[in-house]
């Protein structure tokens, strides 16, 4: 674990804003899953969309993880980093014919989530090996925008359409080797994971899908973001998952591979964004701590109302006061936290925004033409990788295609 003094030293060495990733913590979370879910043939496919830092991906690759990719770009990156095609599942939605053909050519398993795409696949790629994504019909997640189950969302084939899917697949002699569901991100209840499994397993009969090799139950394992959040009992949940799947396989008549595709669980907690406060302003009703980063670099609070813990690295024992922690972007909503009680913040203090390893850098943009921050990966107390920020000139050269 990186301690606060090390975070401060890294910020001084590399400058701020700075994303710091604790590679050891990410691997610990990876190993947790094997500890929690006592199923011998468990495969973890990291949801690359959460954080595509190449050094983190390489660490996961070296420890046997696969990849859940959602765009041709993510497939290209994973292949480039040496993930074998059979370790990658492609779960794009609303893909074009060209994207579909391109990924099929790589040997990566394509996960099809609509009858429309399935029909096209039966015509264009007869005999192909594919996975089918079903909508588990369970609604859960930390936010309405990240729930993927239920018929208010665009994802997956309806469970009711299982026979229709089978008919279409047979028309092109497609081999259905996997079934998939993803319920949402930040699942609040263990019961949701178990219920989604039940719903998918209910349609996964041997008679209907006799060639299954794996079942993929998506991602969504929640991590605590708030100080007082009650964590899910993953040991209990994991043993129930394993027992359920064992029972299913006994009925199905074959031991299948069990897959999960976590993003947040593996990478959220291992990341921190360190920013420097440059302006303290006392408005009539609010004290504003203005810092040298902004929502394009960590958008979750603005987009989802997400809560990220903030630590004042420079003045941990300061007298508590209430702050709006704001960024440097020309929008009122540009806040990392509103009315947050923190130890007194002074100009030039370093603040650490926690749980910034998932869906922060990867959802970043250069809005207001500020380059994304540098990233540093720490393993065994050493700097394992450093990726510098673009300079303003380099960013502008990209824009001008110079
Ligand atoms: N599998 C599929 C098919 C997915 O769509 C996702 C996430 C995952 C796996 C991984 O879910 P996770 O384990 O990371 O919860 N930007 C949002 C989260 C969006 C998740 C999108 N899909 C956030 O910052 O909360």
Image (cartoon, helix red, strand yellow):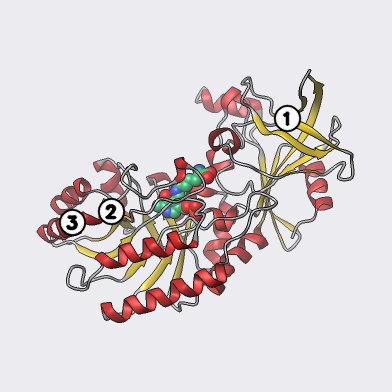
Label disc, if present, on residue 324 of the rendered structure: 1
Q: Earlier in the sequence, mark 2 or mark 1?
A: 2
Q: Earlier in the sequence, mark 2 or mark 3?
A: 2
Find residue 110 and report its horizontal and vertical position in percent.
30, 55
Circle 1 — which element?
strand
Q: Find the distance from the CA under tag 2 to the CA under tag 1.
A: 49 Å
Q: Can residue 402 be seen in the rendering of this structure? A: no
Residue occupying the far left of the picture:
171
Q: Find the distance from the CA under tag 2 to the CA under tag 3.
A: 19 Å
Identify the residue at image location x=26%, y=42%: 98
Find residue 367 and report its horizontal and vertical position in percent.
57, 26
Q: Which residue is mark 3?
A: 165
Circle 2 — which element?
helix
Q: Earlier in the sequence, mark 1 or mark 3?
A: 3
Identify the residue at image location x=15%, y=56%: 164
Q: Which residue is mark 2?
A: 104
């Amino acid at each position: 674990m990186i301690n606060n003094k090390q975070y401060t030293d890294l910020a001084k060495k590399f400058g701020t804003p700075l994303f710091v990733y604790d590679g050891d913590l990410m691997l610990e979370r990876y190993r947790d899953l094997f500890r929690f879910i006592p199923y011998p043939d468990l495969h973890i496919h990291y949801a690359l969309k959460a954080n595509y830092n190449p050094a983190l991906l390489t660490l996961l690759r070296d420890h046997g993880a696969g990849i859940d990719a959602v765009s041709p770009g993510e497939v290209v990156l994973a292949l480039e980093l040496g993930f074998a095609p059979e370790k990658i599942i492609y779960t794009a939605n609303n893909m074009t014919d060209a994207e579909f053909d391109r990924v099929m050519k790589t040997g990566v398993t394509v996960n099809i989530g609509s009858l429309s795409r399935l029909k096209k696949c039966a015509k264009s790629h007869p005999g192909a090996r594919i996975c089918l994504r079903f909508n588990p019909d369970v609604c859960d997640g930390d936010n309405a925008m990240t729930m993927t189950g239920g018929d208010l969302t665009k994802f997956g084939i309806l469970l009711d359409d299982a026979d229709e899917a089978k008919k279409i697949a047979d028309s092109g002699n497609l081999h259905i080797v996997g079934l998939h569901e993803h319920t949402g991100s930040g699942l609040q209840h263990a019961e949701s994971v178990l219920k989604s499994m039940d719903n998918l397993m209910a349609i996964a009969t041997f008679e209907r899908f006799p060639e299954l090799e794996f079942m993929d139950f998506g991602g969504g394992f929640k991590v605590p973001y708030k100080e007082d959040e009650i964590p899910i009992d993953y040991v209990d949940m994991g043993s129930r998952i394993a027992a359920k799947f064992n029972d299913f396989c006994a009925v199905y008549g074959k031991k299948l591979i069990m897959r999960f595709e976590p993003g947040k669980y593996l990478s959220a907690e291992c990341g921190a964004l360190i920013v420097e406060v440059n302006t303290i302003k006392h408005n009539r009703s609010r004290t504003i701590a203005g810092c040298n980063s902004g929502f394009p670099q960590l958008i979750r609070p603005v987009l989802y109302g997400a809560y990220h813990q903030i630590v004042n690295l420079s003045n941990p024992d300061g007298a508590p006061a209430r702050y709006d922690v704001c960024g440097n972007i020309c929008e009122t909503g540009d806040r990392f936290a509103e009315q947050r009680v923190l130890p007194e913040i002074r100009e030039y203090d370093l603040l650490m925004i926690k749980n910034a390893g998932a869906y922060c850098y990867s959802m970043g943009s250069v809005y207001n033409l500020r380059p994304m921050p540098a990233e540093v990966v720490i393993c065994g107390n050493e700097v394992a990788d450093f990726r510098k920020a673009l300079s303003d000139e380099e960013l502008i050269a990209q824009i001008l295609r110079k």
